[in-house]
Amino acid sequence: MAEVLVLGGGVAGISAAWHADRAGREAVIFEAKQRWGGLLDHFHVDGFRFDNAVHFAFSNNEPYKKILAMTDCISHRPRPYNYEQGCWLKHPVQNNLYPLPAEEKVKAILGFIERPDQTEDPNYRQWLEQQFGKVISERFPARYTEKYWTVPSEQMGTEWIGNRLYRPSLEEVLFGAMTDQTPPTYYLPEMLYPRRGGFRTLMDPLREGLDLRTGKKAVCIDPVKRYVECSDGTKEYYHLLASSVALPDLVKMLAGVPTAVQEAAETLWATSIALVSLGFSSPKAGEHLWFYIYDQDIYPSRVHAPYRKSPDNAPHGCSSLQFEIYFSRYKPLQLEGDALVEHVITAVEKMGLASRSDIVAVDYRILPYANVVFDRGMIERRDFVLNHVRNCGILPIGRFGEWDYLWTDQSFLSGKKIEEELGKL
Ligand SMILES: Cc1cc2nc3c(=O)[nH]c(=O)nc-3n(C[C@H](O)[C@H](O)[C@H](O)COP(=O)(O)OP(=O)(O)OC[C@H]3O[C@@H](n4cnc5c(N)ncnc54)[C@H](O)[C@@H]3O)c2cc1C
């Protein structure tokens, strides 16, 4: 019998068990995979280390900042770029139009001046046009949405935006159209990355000493008898259960779920990523730490350079790039496996990032859960499902447990919520 049983050994699960442990409770983590870390984990290919997609640390939250301070980190000043049809623009595009031809800049600026009035409860497309005007919206963020979120922007809500998209003044748009000497307006001034060991290293101080059992995949939960059954046939009884398992998957393994809740859970969906990772024998593949691609005929939407995050991620004198290609139940992959890798390598040469002959390491893999999608009405449907899970006495935690757009620090704080439940034991 576990006093506290935590499903999932990602940051949310580690955080929940760590906070329970610090409160003097016995906590056990069941992690389905053979390695812990979830999205924060990494893998090695021929001497290169790749994280599960781009990951940097940043936070305004004091408890999380204390955790970050335990690890020796490299500080990066975010200077992302955008690639569109052979042109490199500073990020965000809306106030960095400088490299575009004059007539295109004029159209974009006129569109910005004539942007429609703000309305109540706009969909994401309307919201974009209200912020940036039709020309900029259609050419950049709306096109990117179809690659990154895999649906047209009209189908999305706006609840997830927060401070993620910069809303410039007319003066900033004009300034950025006339010069490339624009000040940084990315929403973060600094991002940290561990000097050694990959992104997951940040969680090492928490993971140490925890009872974390890998290869334990929960397949069935009886919330009345309070036990979890695993794919290996074992049963574990619990007093308190926290779950970072993706909400729709959790509902499937829960006994006695009403049909309405099941139906609501089935409408929740997330994007997945096909990750293509390349190692190069040359020292400087690409010029940027990360960048976004708008072209529809180049399938990756975001690319980052692991060796620029830390030189520890590549053998001496080598470099590396990782490409994220998003897909979902609404937009299947156009190419898979070797064919997608070949597409990416062709794009590497087309964008002038590196030479094919320098490639010495290749990896292709799928991350099934990337971003939960905020299609219209999702929040209500999700909350209905979460309400049922909580009524079963289960604490949902983490990005996919709470079904939200959480950064690592927020997933950490989500796991911390277990403190409020411990009093009930
Ligand atoms: C592309 C991308 C880029 C990101 N970049 C950043 C960034 O730069 N900075 C940042 O702060 N955040 C970033 N994030 C967000 C960050 O990755 C998440 O907030 C965080 O990793 C979520 O942790 P989690 O523990 O909630 O979920 P996960 O990491 O998904 O962990 C859940 C765990 O549960 C396990 N599990 C699933 N089912 C079962 C089961 N049935 N039984 C047992 N175990 C199970 C899984 O194997 C997994 O290990 C990014 C996310 C993505 C997708």
Image (tube, rainbow, N blue to C red):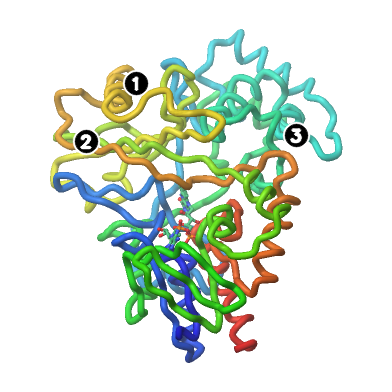
Does 202 sit above or below residue 333?
below
Sequence-wise, which precedes: disc 1 or disc 2? 1
Mark 2 is surrounded, within 10 Å at the Cα level, by few (under 14), some (14 to 19) or many (20 or more) other residues, namely some
Q: Name the element at disc 1.
A: loop
Task: Give percent across and percent down for residue 290.
Answer: 40, 38
Q: Which residue is mark 2?
A: 362
Residue at the top extreme, as displayed:
103
Q: Nearer the viewer, residue 238 or 179?
A: 238
Q: Which residue is mark 1?
A: 351
Q: Amino acid at mark 1?
A: Met
Task: Give percent across and percent down for residue 107.
Answer: 67, 13
Q: Report, in whole angstroms, how far the alpha carbon at label 3 lies from the one at label 1.
A: 33 Å
Task: Please tell me which residue is depicted at 37% across the width and 62% down the height of the picture.
Answer: 32
Q: Report, in whole angstroms, how far the alpha carbon at label 3 lies from the one at label 2.
A: 39 Å
Mark 1 is surrounded, within 10 Å at the Cα level, by few (under 14), some (14 to 19) or many (20 or more) other residues, namely some
Q: Amino acid at mark 3?
A: Asn
Residue at the bottom extreme, as displayed:
24
Disc 3 + disc 2, Cβ < 8 Å:
no
Q: Which residue is mark 3?
A: 123
